[in-house]
Image (cartoon, helix red, strand yellow):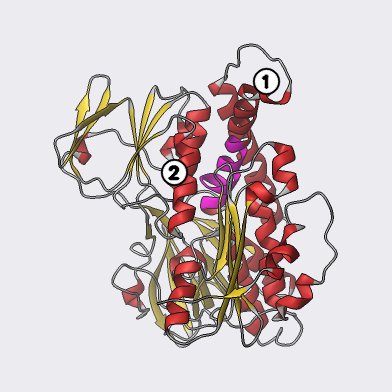
Protein backbone atom coordinates (compact mmCIF):
# COMPACT_ATOMS: atom_id res chain seq x y z
CA UNK A 1 0.00 0.00 0.00
CA UNK A 2 1.59 3.32 -1.07
CA UNK A 3 2.22 5.85 1.67
CA UNK A 4 -0.29 8.68 1.59
CA UNK A 5 0.32 12.40 2.13
CA UNK A 6 -2.05 15.33 2.35
CA UNK A 7 0.25 17.25 0.01
CA UNK A 8 3.09 16.41 -2.35
CA UNK A 9 5.41 19.11 -3.64
CA UNK A 10 7.51 18.16 -6.67
CA UNK A 11 10.61 20.33 -6.83
CA UNK A 12 12.43 22.16 -4.06
CA UNK A 13 12.88 25.50 -5.80
CA UNK A 14 11.99 28.79 -4.14
CA UNK A 15 8.27 28.10 -3.76
CA UNK A 16 8.45 24.46 -2.67
CA UNK A 17 10.30 24.45 0.67
CA UNK A 18 8.53 27.54 2.03
CA UNK A 19 5.16 26.08 1.08
CA UNK A 20 6.07 22.71 2.57
CA UNK A 21 7.04 24.15 5.94
CA UNK A 22 3.97 26.40 6.13
CA UNK A 23 1.57 23.55 5.35
CA UNK A 24 3.40 21.22 7.71
CA UNK A 25 3.16 23.76 10.51
CA UNK A 26 -0.59 23.75 9.90
CA UNK A 27 -0.72 20.00 10.48
CA UNK A 28 -0.62 18.65 6.95
CA UNK A 29 1.59 15.71 6.04
CA UNK A 30 3.87 16.87 3.21
CA UNK A 31 6.09 14.95 0.81
CA UNK A 32 8.93 17.18 -0.42
CA UNK A 33 10.12 15.52 -3.64
CA UNK A 34 13.47 16.53 -5.16
CA UNK A 35 15.51 14.71 -7.79
CA UNK A 36 18.57 16.93 -7.65
CA UNK A 37 19.69 19.64 -5.20
CA UNK A 38 17.55 21.39 -2.61
CA UNK A 39 17.01 25.03 -3.44
CA UNK A 40 16.68 24.64 -7.18
CA UNK A 41 18.35 27.01 -9.63
CA UNK A 42 18.50 30.03 -7.34
CA UNK A 43 20.52 28.46 -4.56
CA UNK A 44 22.66 26.15 -6.67
CA UNK A 45 23.12 27.69 -10.13
CA UNK A 46 21.53 31.13 -10.09
CA UNK A 47 21.21 33.97 -7.61
CA UNK A 48 23.34 32.66 -4.76
CA UNK A 49 26.45 31.62 -6.70
CA UNK A 50 26.38 34.30 -9.37
CA UNK A 51 25.85 37.21 -7.00
CA UNK A 52 28.60 35.85 -4.75
CA UNK A 53 30.90 35.63 -7.76
CA UNK A 54 29.74 39.06 -8.93
CA UNK A 55 31.08 40.53 -5.69
CA UNK A 56 34.53 39.07 -6.29
CA UNK A 57 34.45 40.46 -9.83
CA UNK A 58 33.34 43.89 -8.61
CA UNK A 59 36.10 44.05 -6.02
CA UNK A 60 38.64 43.29 -8.76
CA UNK A 61 37.09 45.96 -10.97
CA UNK A 62 37.17 48.60 -8.24
CA UNK A 63 40.74 47.69 -7.33
CA UNK A 64 41.75 48.33 -10.94
CA UNK A 65 40.02 51.73 -10.68
CA UNK A 66 41.66 52.56 -7.37
CA UNK A 67 43.75 55.36 -8.84
CA UNK A 68 40.52 57.14 -9.91
CA UNK A 69 39.78 57.59 -6.19
CA UNK A 70 43.29 58.54 -5.12
CA UNK A 71 44.26 55.08 -3.93
CA UNK A 72 47.38 53.14 -4.95
CA UNK A 73 47.20 49.35 -4.92
CA UNK A 74 49.81 48.19 -7.43
CA UNK A 75 49.12 45.35 -9.83
CA UNK A 76 45.73 43.68 -9.31
CA UNK A 77 45.63 39.91 -9.62
CA UNK A 78 42.70 37.52 -9.39
CA UNK A 79 42.89 34.14 -7.68
CA UNK A 80 40.16 32.54 -9.78
CA UNK A 81 40.16 29.28 -7.84
CA UNK A 82 39.76 31.15 -4.54
CA UNK A 83 36.88 33.22 -5.92
CA UNK A 84 35.12 30.07 -7.14
CA UNK A 85 35.76 28.34 -3.79
CA UNK A 86 34.20 31.28 -1.96
CA UNK A 87 31.17 31.02 -4.22
CA UNK A 88 30.78 27.27 -3.70
CA UNK A 89 31.11 27.63 0.07
CA UNK A 90 28.28 30.16 0.05
CA UNK A 91 26.10 27.79 -2.02
CA UNK A 92 26.76 24.84 0.26
CA UNK A 93 25.98 26.89 3.36
CA UNK A 94 22.73 28.16 1.87
CA UNK A 95 21.64 24.71 0.71
CA UNK A 96 22.53 23.13 4.06
CA UNK A 97 20.41 25.70 5.89
CA UNK A 98 17.45 24.94 3.65
CA UNK A 99 17.81 21.18 4.11
CA UNK A 100 18.10 21.61 7.87
CA UNK A 101 14.87 23.59 7.96
CA UNK A 102 12.97 20.95 6.01
CA UNK A 103 14.43 18.07 7.99
CA UNK A 104 13.50 19.81 11.23
CA UNK A 105 9.83 20.07 10.26
CA UNK A 106 7.94 17.22 11.92
CA UNK A 107 5.37 16.78 9.16
CA UNK A 108 7.70 17.06 6.14
CA UNK A 109 9.25 13.96 4.60
CA UNK A 110 11.96 14.50 2.00
CA UNK A 111 11.75 12.01 -0.86
CA UNK A 112 14.85 11.92 -3.07
CA UNK A 113 14.21 11.22 -6.72
CA UNK A 114 12.52 12.62 -9.81
CA UNK A 115 8.79 12.70 -9.20
CA UNK A 116 6.26 11.91 -11.91
CA UNK A 117 2.52 11.32 -12.10
CA UNK A 118 1.42 7.70 -12.37
CA UNK A 119 -2.31 8.33 -12.25
CA UNK A 120 -5.33 9.77 -10.44
CA UNK A 121 -8.02 7.74 -8.72
CA UNK A 122 -10.69 8.39 -6.09
CA UNK A 123 -9.51 11.93 -5.45
CA UNK A 124 -5.89 10.92 -4.94
CA UNK A 125 -2.89 11.44 -7.16
CA UNK A 126 -0.35 8.65 -7.49
CA UNK A 127 3.31 9.67 -7.83
CA UNK A 128 6.28 7.57 -8.80
CA UNK A 129 9.59 8.65 -7.24
CA UNK A 130 12.27 6.27 -8.38
CA UNK A 131 11.23 2.87 -7.00
CA UNK A 132 8.84 4.43 -4.49
CA UNK A 133 5.13 5.03 -5.01
CA UNK A 134 3.14 7.52 -2.92
CA UNK A 135 -0.28 9.13 -3.08
CA UNK A 136 -1.41 12.66 -2.26
CA UNK A 137 -4.62 14.67 -2.16
CA UNK A 138 -2.94 17.80 -3.53
CA UNK A 139 0.16 18.29 -5.69
CA UNK A 140 2.21 21.43 -6.23
CA UNK A 141 4.70 21.43 -9.12
CA UNK A 142 7.83 23.58 -8.66
CA UNK A 143 10.31 21.92 -11.01
CA UNK A 144 11.57 25.04 -12.78
CA UNK A 145 13.52 25.25 -16.01
CA UNK A 146 16.91 24.38 -17.50
CA UNK A 147 19.16 25.94 -20.11
CA UNK A 148 17.97 25.84 -23.72
CA UNK A 149 20.71 24.80 -26.12
CA UNK A 150 20.13 25.87 -29.75
CA UNK A 151 20.23 23.36 -32.58
CA UNK A 152 23.44 24.46 -34.26
CA UNK A 153 25.45 22.27 -36.60
CA UNK A 154 28.32 20.66 -34.70
CA UNK A 155 27.07 21.54 -31.22
CA UNK A 156 26.87 17.91 -30.10
CA UNK A 157 30.64 17.54 -30.65
CA UNK A 158 31.62 20.69 -28.73
CA UNK A 159 32.17 20.79 -24.94
CA UNK A 160 29.93 23.81 -24.44
CA UNK A 161 28.96 25.39 -21.12
CA UNK A 162 25.58 26.33 -19.69
CA UNK A 163 24.74 28.21 -16.50
CA UNK A 164 25.43 25.07 -14.45
CA UNK A 165 28.72 23.85 -15.91
CA UNK A 166 30.10 27.41 -16.12
CA UNK A 167 30.13 27.53 -12.32
CA UNK A 168 32.03 24.24 -12.13
CA UNK A 169 35.15 25.71 -13.76
CA UNK A 170 38.34 25.72 -11.71
CA UNK A 171 40.46 27.74 -14.13
CA UNK A 172 39.55 31.05 -15.72
CA UNK A 173 38.82 30.78 -19.46
CA UNK A 174 41.39 32.51 -21.64
CA UNK A 175 38.63 33.51 -24.07
CA UNK A 176 34.96 32.96 -23.23
CA UNK A 177 32.54 33.17 -26.15
CA UNK A 178 29.03 33.93 -24.88
CA UNK A 179 26.15 33.13 -27.22
CA UNK A 180 23.26 35.33 -26.09
CA UNK A 181 23.07 39.07 -25.43
CA UNK A 182 20.39 39.11 -22.78
CA UNK A 183 20.44 39.06 -18.98
CA UNK A 184 22.37 35.88 -18.16
CA UNK A 185 24.84 36.36 -21.00
CA UNK A 186 25.54 39.95 -20.00
CA UNK A 187 25.92 39.19 -16.31
CA UNK A 188 28.24 36.25 -16.85
CA UNK A 189 30.18 37.97 -19.60
CA UNK A 190 30.98 40.94 -17.38
CA UNK A 191 31.80 38.79 -14.33
CA UNK A 192 34.24 36.58 -16.22
CA UNK A 193 35.81 39.56 -17.97
CA UNK A 194 36.52 41.13 -14.58
CA UNK A 195 37.92 37.83 -13.33
CA UNK A 196 40.43 37.81 -16.16
CA UNK A 197 38.87 36.24 -19.25
CA UNK A 198 38.74 37.75 -22.69
CA UNK A 199 35.04 37.84 -23.57
CA UNK A 200 33.11 37.98 -26.85
CA UNK A 201 29.30 38.23 -26.82
CA UNK A 202 27.46 36.96 -29.91
CA UNK A 203 23.95 38.38 -29.94
CA UNK A 204 21.31 37.35 -32.46
CA UNK A 205 19.24 40.49 -31.83
CA UNK A 206 19.96 43.93 -33.21
CA UNK A 207 20.81 45.22 -29.72
CA UNK A 208 21.71 43.93 -26.28
CA UNK A 209 18.88 43.24 -23.81
CA UNK A 210 16.40 43.77 -26.64
CA UNK A 211 13.44 43.57 -24.26
CA UNK A 212 14.50 46.96 -22.92
CA UNK A 213 14.09 50.40 -24.47
CA UNK A 214 16.60 51.33 -27.17
CA UNK A 215 18.38 53.96 -25.09
CA UNK A 216 18.70 51.51 -22.20
CA UNK A 217 20.25 48.97 -24.57
CA UNK A 218 22.66 51.64 -25.76
CA UNK A 219 23.74 52.40 -22.18
CA UNK A 220 24.34 48.70 -21.57
CA UNK A 221 26.37 48.34 -24.76
CA UNK A 222 28.52 51.32 -23.83
CA UNK A 223 29.47 50.16 -20.35
CA UNK A 224 30.04 46.59 -21.53
CA UNK A 225 32.34 47.69 -24.33
CA UNK A 226 34.12 50.09 -21.96
CA UNK A 227 35.37 46.96 -20.18
CA UNK A 228 36.88 45.63 -23.42
CA UNK A 229 34.14 43.08 -23.98
CA UNK A 230 33.64 42.49 -27.68
CA UNK A 231 29.97 42.67 -28.68
CA UNK A 232 28.69 41.44 -32.02
CA UNK A 233 24.98 42.14 -32.55
CA UNK A 234 22.61 40.78 -35.18
CA UNK A 235 24.71 37.71 -35.86
CA UNK A 236 23.67 34.28 -37.05
CA UNK A 237 25.71 31.19 -36.22
CA UNK A 238 25.95 28.55 -38.92
CA UNK A 239 28.06 25.99 -37.07
CA UNK A 240 30.54 25.37 -34.27
CA UNK A 241 33.75 23.33 -34.39
CA UNK A 242 35.88 21.67 -31.75
CA UNK A 243 39.51 22.77 -31.70
CA UNK A 244 42.49 21.44 -29.78
CA UNK A 245 42.60 24.81 -28.03
CA UNK A 246 38.84 25.13 -27.53
CA UNK A 247 36.09 25.96 -29.97
CA UNK A 248 35.39 27.93 -33.14
CA UNK A 249 32.10 29.63 -33.96
CA UNK A 250 31.42 30.28 -37.64
CA UNK A 251 28.95 33.01 -38.54
CA UNK A 252 26.75 33.25 -41.62
CA UNK A 253 29.12 35.79 -43.19
CA UNK A 254 31.99 33.28 -42.76
CA UNK A 255 33.54 35.15 -39.86
CA UNK A 256 35.32 32.77 -37.54
CA UNK A 257 35.45 33.45 -33.80
CA UNK A 258 37.83 31.22 -31.85
CA UNK A 259 37.85 30.84 -28.07
CA UNK A 260 38.78 28.46 -25.31
CA UNK A 261 35.26 28.14 -23.89
CA UNK A 262 31.73 28.47 -25.27
CA UNK A 263 28.76 29.47 -23.09
CA UNK A 264 25.16 29.23 -24.29
CA UNK A 265 22.91 31.81 -22.62
CA UNK A 266 20.03 31.40 -25.03
CA UNK A 267 16.94 31.03 -22.88
CA UNK A 268 15.27 28.38 -20.75
CA UNK A 269 13.02 25.34 -21.27
CA UNK A 270 10.62 23.92 -18.65
CA UNK A 271 11.33 20.75 -16.70
CA UNK A 272 7.90 19.36 -17.46
CA UNK A 273 8.98 16.53 -19.77
CA UNK A 274 9.75 14.16 -16.88
CA UNK A 275 6.49 14.69 -14.99
CA UNK A 276 4.26 12.41 -17.12
CA UNK A 277 1.58 15.07 -17.08
CA UNK A 278 -0.50 13.18 -19.64
CA UNK A 279 -1.24 10.58 -16.96
CA UNK A 280 -3.38 13.13 -15.12
CA UNK A 281 -4.35 15.42 -18.01
CA UNK A 282 -2.48 18.61 -17.05
CA UNK A 283 -2.36 21.08 -19.93
CA UNK A 284 0.84 22.73 -21.17
CA UNK A 285 1.53 25.25 -23.91
CA UNK A 286 3.43 24.38 -27.08
CA UNK A 287 6.75 24.89 -25.28
CA UNK A 288 5.92 22.70 -22.30
CA UNK A 289 5.11 25.42 -19.76
CA UNK A 290 2.22 24.46 -17.50
CA UNK A 291 -0.89 26.57 -17.95
CA UNK A 292 -2.56 27.96 -14.82
CA UNK A 293 -5.29 30.37 -13.79
CA UNK A 294 -4.59 33.49 -11.75
CA UNK A 295 -4.61 31.40 -8.56
CA UNK A 296 -1.92 29.17 -10.10
CA UNK A 297 -4.18 26.12 -10.34
CA UNK A 298 -3.87 23.96 -13.44
CA UNK A 299 -6.82 22.64 -15.40
CA UNK A 300 -6.81 19.61 -13.06
CA UNK A 301 -8.42 20.29 -9.71
CA UNK A 302 -5.90 19.68 -6.95
CA UNK A 303 -2.73 20.40 -8.98
CA UNK A 304 -0.95 23.74 -8.96
CA UNK A 305 2.15 24.95 -10.81
CA UNK A 306 4.50 27.43 -9.15
CA UNK A 307 7.65 29.21 -10.26
CA UNK A 308 9.37 29.27 -13.65
CA UNK A 309 7.42 26.32 -14.99
CA UNK A 310 4.16 28.32 -15.14
CA UNK A 311 5.76 31.03 -17.33
CA UNK A 312 4.57 33.83 -15.06
CA UNK A 313 8.08 35.10 -14.35
CA UNK A 314 11.39 33.27 -14.47
CA UNK A 315 12.57 34.80 -11.22
CA UNK A 316 13.18 33.69 -7.66
CA UNK A 317 10.94 36.43 -6.31
CA UNK A 318 7.97 35.45 -8.49
CA UNK A 319 8.38 31.80 -7.51
CA UNK A 320 8.37 32.69 -3.82
CA UNK A 321 5.44 35.04 -4.36
CA UNK A 322 3.56 32.18 -6.06
CA UNK A 323 3.59 30.17 -2.83
CA UNK A 324 2.17 33.18 -1.00
CA UNK A 325 -0.65 33.48 -3.53
CA UNK A 326 -1.46 29.79 -3.13
CA UNK A 327 -1.56 30.09 0.65
CA UNK A 328 -3.72 33.23 0.50
CA UNK A 329 -6.24 31.26 -1.57
CA UNK A 330 -6.16 28.08 0.52
CA UNK A 331 -9.31 27.28 2.49
CA UNK A 332 -7.64 27.51 5.88
CA UNK A 333 -5.91 30.83 5.11
CA UNK A 334 -8.37 32.97 3.15
CA UNK A 335 -8.49 36.33 4.92
CA UNK A 336 -5.64 35.54 7.29
CA UNK A 337 -2.84 36.67 4.98
CA UNK A 338 -2.63 40.23 3.68
CA UNK A 339 -1.51 39.06 0.28
CA UNK A 340 -2.48 39.27 -3.37
CA UNK A 341 -4.61 36.29 -4.34
CA UNK A 342 -4.38 36.92 -8.08
CA UNK A 343 -1.15 36.42 -10.05
CA UNK A 344 -2.55 38.50 -12.90
CA UNK A 345 -2.67 41.48 -10.55
CA UNK A 346 1.04 41.80 -9.92
CA UNK A 347 3.29 43.78 -12.28
CA UNK A 348 6.31 42.15 -13.84
CA UNK A 349 9.41 43.26 -11.98
CA UNK A 350 13.01 42.15 -12.22
CA UNK A 351 16.63 43.21 -12.18
CA UNK A 352 19.65 42.51 -14.33
CA UNK A 353 22.69 42.29 -12.06
CA UNK A 354 25.29 43.72 -14.35
CA UNK A 355 27.38 46.56 -12.92
CA UNK A 356 25.72 48.99 -13.06
CA UNK A 357 22.49 47.02 -12.63
CA UNK A 358 19.10 47.42 -14.28
CA UNK A 359 15.83 47.54 -12.37
CA UNK A 360 12.51 47.20 -14.19
CA UNK A 361 8.84 47.10 -13.25
CA UNK A 362 5.70 47.26 -15.37
CA UNK A 363 5.71 49.33 -18.55
CA UNK A 364 8.79 50.54 -20.37
CA UNK A 365 8.76 53.46 -22.79
CA UNK A 366 7.89 51.27 -25.78
CA UNK A 367 4.86 49.91 -23.89
CA UNK A 368 3.88 53.44 -22.89
CA UNK A 369 4.06 54.67 -26.49
CA UNK A 370 1.77 51.85 -27.59
CA UNK A 371 -0.69 52.67 -24.80
CA UNK A 372 -0.64 56.35 -25.76
CA UNK A 373 -1.32 55.49 -29.39
CA UNK A 374 -4.34 53.55 -28.18
CA UNK A 375 -5.67 56.63 -26.43
CA UNK A 376 -4.42 56.16 -22.87
CA UNK A 377 -3.34 59.31 -21.03
CA UNK A 378 0.33 58.59 -20.28
CA UNK A 379 2.76 60.76 -18.36
CA UNK A 380 6.53 60.20 -18.43
CA UNK A 381 9.58 61.73 -16.84
CA UNK A 382 13.25 60.84 -16.75
CA UNK A 383 16.64 61.98 -15.52
CA UNK A 384 20.13 60.80 -16.32
CA UNK A 385 22.20 59.23 -13.56
CA UNK A 386 24.79 61.92 -14.24
CA UNK A 387 22.32 64.33 -12.56
CA UNK A 388 22.31 62.30 -9.33
CA UNK A 389 24.65 63.64 -6.65
CA UNK A 390 25.30 60.21 -5.14
CA UNK A 391 26.23 58.77 -8.53
CA UNK A 392 28.70 61.59 -9.13
CA UNK A 393 30.20 61.17 -5.66
CA UNK A 394 30.63 57.44 -6.27
CA UNK A 395 32.11 58.00 -9.72
CA UNK A 396 29.41 55.83 -11.34
CA UNK A 397 27.30 58.10 -13.53
CA UNK A 398 26.17 55.76 -16.33
CA UNK A 399 22.43 55.24 -16.63
CA UNK A 400 19.02 56.83 -16.27
CA UNK A 401 15.79 56.86 -14.26
CA UNK A 402 12.52 56.72 -16.22
CA UNK A 403 9.06 56.73 -14.65
CA UNK A 404 5.70 56.14 -16.36
CA UNK A 405 2.35 57.22 -14.88
CA UNK A 406 -1.33 56.91 -15.81
CA UNK A 407 -2.55 60.49 -16.22
CA UNK A 408 -6.12 59.61 -15.24
CA UNK A 409 -5.64 57.37 -12.20
CA UNK A 410 -2.28 58.94 -11.28
CA UNK A 411 -0.95 55.46 -10.52
CA UNK A 412 2.61 54.56 -11.48
CA UNK A 413 2.56 52.12 -14.41
CA UNK A 414 6.24 51.31 -14.70
CA UNK A 415 9.85 52.28 -14.31
CA UNK A 416 13.19 51.62 -15.94
CA UNK A 417 16.21 52.41 -13.78
CA UNK A 418 19.70 51.60 -14.91
CA UNK A 419 22.69 52.75 -12.94
CA UNK A 420 24.19 52.64 -9.48
CA UNK A 421 21.87 50.90 -6.97
CA UNK A 422 19.11 50.46 -9.56
CA UNK A 423 18.45 46.92 -8.31
CA UNK A 424 17.60 48.38 -4.89
CA UNK A 425 15.94 51.63 -5.96
CA UNK A 426 13.43 49.79 -8.15
CA UNK A 427 11.97 48.26 -4.97
CA UNK A 428 10.83 51.73 -3.92
CA UNK A 429 8.69 51.84 -7.06
CA UNK A 430 7.41 48.25 -6.93
CA UNK A 431 6.46 48.59 -3.26
CA UNK A 432 4.73 51.90 -3.92
CA UNK A 433 2.83 50.48 -6.91
CA UNK A 434 1.39 47.80 -4.62
CA UNK A 435 -0.39 50.53 -2.66
CA UNK A 436 -2.20 51.73 -5.83
CA UNK A 437 -1.73 55.28 -4.56
CA UNK A 438 -1.34 58.46 -6.58
CA UNK A 439 2.21 59.27 -7.61
CA UNK A 440 1.72 62.57 -5.76
CA UNK A 441 2.10 60.72 -2.46
CA UNK A 442 5.59 59.54 -3.44
CA UNK A 443 6.37 62.97 -4.85
CA UNK A 444 5.67 64.53 -1.44
CA UNK A 445 7.84 62.03 0.46
CA UNK A 446 10.92 63.18 2.33
CA UNK A 447 13.93 61.33 0.86
CA UNK A 448 17.30 60.88 2.49
CA UNK A 449 20.30 62.71 1.05
CA UNK A 450 22.59 61.67 -0.51
CA UNK A 451 20.96 58.62 -2.06
CA UNK A 452 19.93 57.59 -5.55
CA UNK A 453 16.31 57.16 -4.48
CA UNK A 454 16.12 60.79 -3.34
CA UNK A 455 15.79 61.84 -6.99
CA UNK A 456 12.43 60.04 -7.43
CA UNK A 457 10.26 62.96 -6.21
CA UNK A 458 12.26 65.32 -8.42
CA UNK A 459 11.75 63.07 -11.44
CA UNK A 460 8.01 62.88 -10.73
CA UNK A 461 7.84 66.67 -10.57
CA UNK A 462 8.88 66.69 -14.23
CA UNK A 463 6.08 64.45 -15.54
CA UNK A 464 4.77 65.45 -18.97
CA UNK A 465 2.15 63.92 -21.21
CA UNK A 466 3.61 61.45 -23.67
CA UNK A 467 2.86 62.58 -27.19
CA UNK A 468 3.15 60.07 -30.02
CA UNK A 469 2.59 60.58 -33.71
Q: Examine the image and state in which quarter residue 380 appears.
A: bottom right
| Residue 406 in the image, given as x and y percentages of width and height | 60, 81
Residue plotted at (62% across, 61% down): 17
Q: Is residue 192 magenta?
A: no
Q: Earlier in the sequence, mark 2 or mark 1?
A: 1
Secondary structure of residue under mark 2:
helix
Magenta stretch?
41-54
Residue 292 visible somewhere in the drawing: no
Instruction: Describe residue 421's horizontal placement relative to residue 80 as left or right.
Output: right
Q: Position of residue 450 (x, y in %)?
A: 81, 49
Q: Residues within 10 Å of mark 1 (few under 14, many from 20)?
A: few
Q: Which sits in the foreground, 159 or 57?
A: 57
Identify the mark at residue 412; answer none if there is no mark: none
Q: Nearer the viewer, residue 469 or 120?
A: 469
Find residue 284 and report its horizontal and vertical position in percent. 35, 75
Q: Answer with left or right where residue 68 lies relative to residue 370.
A: right
Can you tell which mark lies on residue 221? 2
Above or below, 280 against 348 in this view is below
Q: Nearer the viewer, residue 182 or 419?
A: 419
205 up-or-down from 270: above or below = above
Q: Is residue 77 above or below residue 28?
A: above
Residue 97 image point, x, y percent? 69, 47
Instruction: Indicate which disc residue 67 carries.
Output: 1
- Count neighbours of disc 2 (C-alpha within 10 A) and say few if under 14, some if 14 to 19, many if 20 or more: some
Amino acid sequence: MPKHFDTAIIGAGQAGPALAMFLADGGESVAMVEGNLMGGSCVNYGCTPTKTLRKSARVAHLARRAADFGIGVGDVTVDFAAAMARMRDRVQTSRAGLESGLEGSENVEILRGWGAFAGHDNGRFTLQIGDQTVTADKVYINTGTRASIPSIKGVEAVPYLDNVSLLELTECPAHLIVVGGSYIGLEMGQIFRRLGAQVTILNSSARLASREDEDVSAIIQEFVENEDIRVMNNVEITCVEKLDSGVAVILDDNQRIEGTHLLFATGRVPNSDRLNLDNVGVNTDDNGFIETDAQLQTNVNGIWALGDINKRGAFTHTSYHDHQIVLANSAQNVGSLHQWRDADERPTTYAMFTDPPLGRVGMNLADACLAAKNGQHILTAERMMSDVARAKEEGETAGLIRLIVDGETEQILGASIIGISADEVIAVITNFMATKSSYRVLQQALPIHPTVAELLPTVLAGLKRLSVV
